[in-house]
Amino acid sequence: MSPRVVAIGGGKGGVGKSLVAANVGIFLATLGKRVILVDAAFGAPNLHMFAGVPRPSRSLHEAMRETDPVPLVEVAVPTHVPGVRLIAAVDDPPSAAEPALERVRAIGDQLRSLDADWVVVDLAPGMARSTLELFALADVAMLVAVPDPTSIELMHRFVRAAFVHSLVRAGLERLIPIDTKHHEGGAPSPLEIYLSAVAGGDPGSSAEARRGAIDALRTTILKFAPHLVINSARSKSDMELGRAVASAAR
């Protein structure tokens, strides 16, 4: 049986994604689950510190290199937490910050074959294609933000970019409006894309093909439901922020 994949991302760095990833993995292990933590924060890895493995002996780059890559499972190292293993990236070369998308997809495929019940993936901040690709393939997608205007704004941008990327993965990129200058954050919302498609946003196709594309778009919209964690909440207003952001997103 394939493991379930949790991907933890967000638009801004320093909001605690690695801390959340490590704690999610440790919590699942306390429930008796076999967990593998994966540091996919390409170019900025630090999950090994939160996992208590300051000097991991293996590295993710071994599985991502174009020449003679090793199977991903071989670079997983044990941690001090029973049931938790780590695929670290601390010794990856600087070139690892910009991995080829096909190598990222290959790693994504291998996540499903790991010997674990859960795989928790810590993603890099920002909206690089490699980050959005791993976020989109997860069974459980989580966003981490802090109660700070810059973090919330970038989180919204990340959500829009992640949704647009999910359309690309589903083969529905032709439904994405080309003109983005009138869209908040530079990317259209799911509702804007859906209304454009219903209004005839795929003119080169037959009526039957358009109906099929709209049905696929509706399915993709309903499946896109990332979870939100507001980290570093210190006041009642901070705690209420999560509900406010979720309401605005809906």
Image: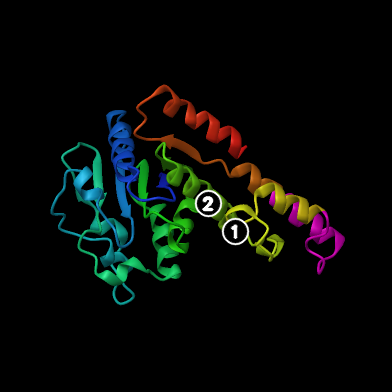
Q: Amino acid at mark 1?
A: Gly
Residue ranking furthest to the bottom: 67
Whole-percent x, y for residue 185 in the image? 57, 54
Left or right position of 243 against 42: right
Residue ranking furthest to the left: 55
Q: Which mark is residue 96?
A: none
Q: Quadrant of the N terminus?
A: top left
Above/below status of 152 relative to 11: above
Q: Nearer the viewer, residue 116 or 188?
A: 188
The answer to whether residue 213 is magenta is yes
Query: Is any part of residue 1 visible from this angle?
Result: no
Query: Bounds of the magenta span?
Result: 199-217
Residue ranking furthest to the front: 149
Query: Callout 2: helix, strand or loop?
Result: helix
Pointer 1 residue: 186
Query: How much space separates mark 2 and mark 1, taking CA atoms?
Result: 8 Å
Pointer 2 residue: 157
Q: Quadrant of residue 42?
A: bottom left
Q: Amino acid at mark 2?
A: Arg
Q: Quadrant of the C terminus?
A: top right
Left or right position of 87 against 244: left
- Neighbours of disc 2 within 10 Å: few (<14), some (14-19), many (20+): some
* Residue at image coords 29%, 58%: 44
Query: Is any part of residue 248 visible from this angle?
Result: yes
